[in-house]
Image (cartoon, rainbow, N blue to C red):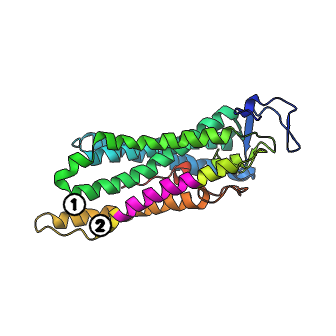
Amino acid sequence: MTKCLPWETPVGEEIDGYNLTTVTHFILTGLSDLPEVHYPLFAVLAITHQVTLLGNGAILLVIATEKNTTIYYFLASLSLLDIFCPSATVPKMLDNLFTGNDSISFLSCVLQLYFLVALAGTEVFLLAVIAYDRYVANFFPLRYTLIMTKARCAQLAAGFLHSLLHTVSTFCLSFCKSSRVNQYYCDIPPVVALSCSSTYIEEMLMFVVSNILGIGAFLTTFISYVHHIHLPKDPNSGREAQSLLHMCLPPHGDWVVLWHSNIYLFGLPPVTTPQPGTGSSPCSMGLSPQC
C-alpha cells in the first residue's frame, strides 16, 4: 500500500518499475534558462510586485476612511487577496532569478501550492460575490440586509477548503519520475505529472470540482452582469448609478474573463504533462485589478 506522505516512502520500494526515493525538494524549471535574462526578469517582476503592493495598499487606506458597508468590505478583501496571492509565489521567483538556485523544499512546495490555490480560488468566489452583491443592492434593496448576511459572506472560506482538498490529494501521490517541475512555481498539473502512482483520482477530482465551482462562479457573475446591463434608470439617481456601472463593469468584467479563462485552460482538462510557463494564474505573476 502506498503511503499518503511521499516523503515517508521507504527508499528502494518500487512502483511500476520506478525506484522510489525520499523526496526532499523540487526543481522549478518554468523560467528562462538563459542567465543573461535573469536580472531583467528580476527587475520587471520586482517592479510589478511593488506596484501591486502599493496600489492595493493605497486602496485599503482609502477604504479605511469610508463608511463600513458591505461593498467596502468586499473591496478591502479583494485588495488583501491581491496582496497575498502574488506574495505566495513572487518572492520565491525573485530569489530563484537573483541567486540562480531553482530548488524549492518539499514543504515549501506544499505550502506554496496550498496558499496559491486557496487565495486564487477565494478571489474567483469573491468576484462572483461582488457581482451578486451589486445585483441584490440594485434589485432588492429592501431585502439586502436579509440576503447579504455575515454568514453568507463567510462562505468565501470555501476557497481554502477547496485548496486543502487538492493539496492533500496531490501530495498523497508517490513521486519518483523526476523532481523537475515544469513551471516557475508549484502548481497542481506540473506536480501531479511527476507522480509514478495512479493520478486518475486527482485528475477527476480537479476536473469535477473545477467544473462545479468554476462554472457556478462564472454563471453567478455573468447573470448578475446581464441584469445590471438592463438596470432601469431612476430620474434622480439613475444617471450616477449608470455612470458608475459603465466605469467599473469593463475592468471588473475583463478581470473575471481573465481568471476564468485560466481556470478552463489548465484546471478543467485531465492532467497531462504541462509545458513550461503555461497555465499561469494572474495572481501568480503579481497582477491584480484596480477597480
Residue 271: where, in percent of width, then height?
Answer: 68, 55
Is residue 117 toward the left or the right of residue 129 in the image? right
Residue 119: where, in percent of width, then height?
Answer: 49, 44
Residue 23: where, in percent of width, then height?
Answer: 76, 34
Q: Nearer the viewer, residue 284 or 111?
A: 111
Residue that mark 2 sits on: 227
Residue kind at label 2, given as amino acid type? His
The Cα–Cα distance between marks 1 and 2, rounded to whole angstroms, is: 9 Å
Look at 60% across and 51% down and name the residue there: 206
Mark found first going from the N terminus, 1 or 2? 1
Is residue 56 toward the left or the right of residue 92 in the image? left
**Residue stretch rendered in magenta on the structure:** 208-223
Viewport quadrant of the N terminus: top right
Residue 158 placement: quadrant: top left
Main secondary structure type of the part rendered in magenta: helix
Look at 39% across and 55% down and name the residue there: 128
Q: Nearer the viewer, residue 243 or 114?
A: 114
Residue that mark 1 sits on: 139
Q: Is residue 215 magenta?
A: yes
Residue 256: where, in percent of width, then height?
Answer: 44, 59
Is residue 87 toward the left or the right of residue 239 in the image? right
Residue kind at label 1, given as amino acid type? Phe
Q: Secondary structure at mark 2?
A: helix
Residue 207 placement: quadrant: bottom right
